[in-house]
Image (tube, helix red, strand yellow):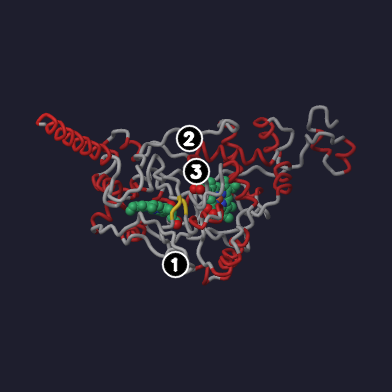
Amino acid sequence: MKVELYGAQSMRLFVLLRCALLLVVVAGRVPAAGDPDVDPPLASLPPVPVPPDNPITQEKAELGKLLFFDTRLTGDASLSCGDCHDPKKGWGSNQPISRGYPGAVHWRNSHTAVNSGYLGKLFWQGSSKSLETQAPTANRGAVAGNGERDVMQSRLRQTPHYIRKFKEIFGTERPVLGDAWQAIATFERAMLSQRDTPLDRYLEGDEDALSEEAVAGLKLFQGKANCIECHNGPLLSDEKYYNLGVPRPPEWESTGLNTITFRWENYAKGLPEKGYREWKDDAGLFYTTKRPDDIGKHRTQPLRYLAFTPPYMHAGQFFSLEEVIDFYNDGGGNNEFTDGSHGINTKTPILKPLDLTDEEKEALVIFLDEISGDEIKMPVPEVPLYEAMPDVPGLTQAKAKRIGLEMYLSNREGGGQ
Ligand code: HEC
Ligand code: HEC
């Protein structure tokens, strides 16, 4: 009996000890009470992933850089990627809602293109799967580039520099538009990836890489403020989708052009009629999945380049990091997909009032500011000029003469065909 009693007691002790040990181990990884999952720790950025069918080469990245800033790849040739992803504006736009194609406005905030090579899915609603497929949607999308395929391709084919470069890089006689998107994606991957920032150095063991205040901010980020629940891993994003209750931007109701774009986007993205007539907020991930649980959810943003990319959130609802922290301190906000106005409430239960002191709020802002690292500065390159093409296959002297191009042919060895 005695022995059995001892046995049961020590078994209980053993179980208790194991529980305590488990708690210690888990406590190191799960930062605050009420967390639904275990979060990958913050980590320094690994090399950017490269798809096997679009390897990075210096020449391709250089070509992509030209194309990124070239207005030939939009409808009326007045706008380039670089106009909405401006190097001087954090490679984004610094307007709450991005400018649009001339005569229109966009309806969302323009992301920074920095570090976009690391993202599994792109856009606030994760609707694009790679940089290669994202670029054409930007340049053909009605409120962005509004370009027509053949026209954009023809413009490349009338530019000798591009003809030469596309031939060298892709082996084609004349530029093919799809290769332009490959080159732009390579540029983004190769030149707009930001490693070796103060955060990377700190996480790799250099304790002086961040100031004392920033380290205090980091502790809050991973602890009391519970940002780590969603902003985790090397990018500081779990790449999942949440409705935080970010309020609706006033422009959608106050400014005619914005209202038109908002309504058009809802229509084009296939919102069911009831939603089209009644909803006044951005339904986010729902447009992609059409699952009611996804209404009003947007992607967790990476936080690595924030100092250069105000305003913040999907329609630039907050102008400063201080405003963002106040928003989280209040436990997030409300919009029509949190308040049950359409019988819908998808607000994440993760957000709770944080009860941060002014000092703690400041430490968080300092942390976010310091980890932004150096600005990626790049002068806007001069794009190549259109020129008459001497080397068009099949262009004979006689034909060239008829269209006034013979002087170009005479410069060429053999002169025509
Ligand atoms: C008229 C403005 C405009 C133009 C032109 C434009 N973009 Fe964008 N870009 C935006 C906006 C706005 C978003 C956010 C859209 C959304 O999520 O619905 C965006 C999103 C992106 C993203 C997603 C980043 C992320 O974090 O998910 C990338 C990458 C990008 N653009 C690259 C490009 C490239 C490359 C071009 C040229 C081929 C281009 N953009 C042209 C406005 C523009
Ligand atoms: C429940 C998940 C979640 C938690 C917790 C969370 N965030 Fe976010 N964060 C998001 C999502 C989702 C977005 C984009 C929301 C949108 O635009 O509607 C975002 C956006 C942001 C942005 C704007 C970035 C940009 O480029 O526009 C900042 C800054 C930010 N969060 C910082 C924080 C900080 C600091 C904390 C902790 C106090 C925190 N977040 C906690 C999910 C979360």
The crowding category of the residue bearing disc 2, from other C-alpha atoms within 10 Å (few below 14, some 14 to 19, many at least 20), is some
Dot 3, crowdedness within 10 Å: few (<14), some or many (≥20)?
A: many
Corner quadrant of residue 59 = top right
Marked residue nearer the N-terminal end (2 or 3): 2
SS under mark 2:
loop
Q: Which residue is mark 2?
A: 48
Which residue, given by chain and number where applicable, does mark 1 sit on? 340
Question: For disc 3, does the CB lie below 8 Å from ligand 1?
Answer: yes
- Do the numbered discs 2 and 3 sit on residues whose CB atoms are within 8 Å? no
Q: Say if residue 309 shows up in the picture.
A: no
Name the spot of residue 219 as percent of width and height, x first.
26, 46
Q: Secondary structure at mark 1?
A: loop
Give how far apart the Cα atoms at labels 2 and 1 are. 42 Å
List the single residue furthest toward the front. Answer: 1
Of the numbered discs in the image, which one, if any, rests on residue 280? none
* Residue at the spot 51% in from the left edge and 56% down from the top edge: 284
- Mark 3 highlights which residue? 116
Horizontally, residue 332 falls left or right of residue 157, namely: left
Label 1 amino acid? Gly
Q: Amino acid at mark 2?
A: Val
The quarter of the image holding the C terminus is top right
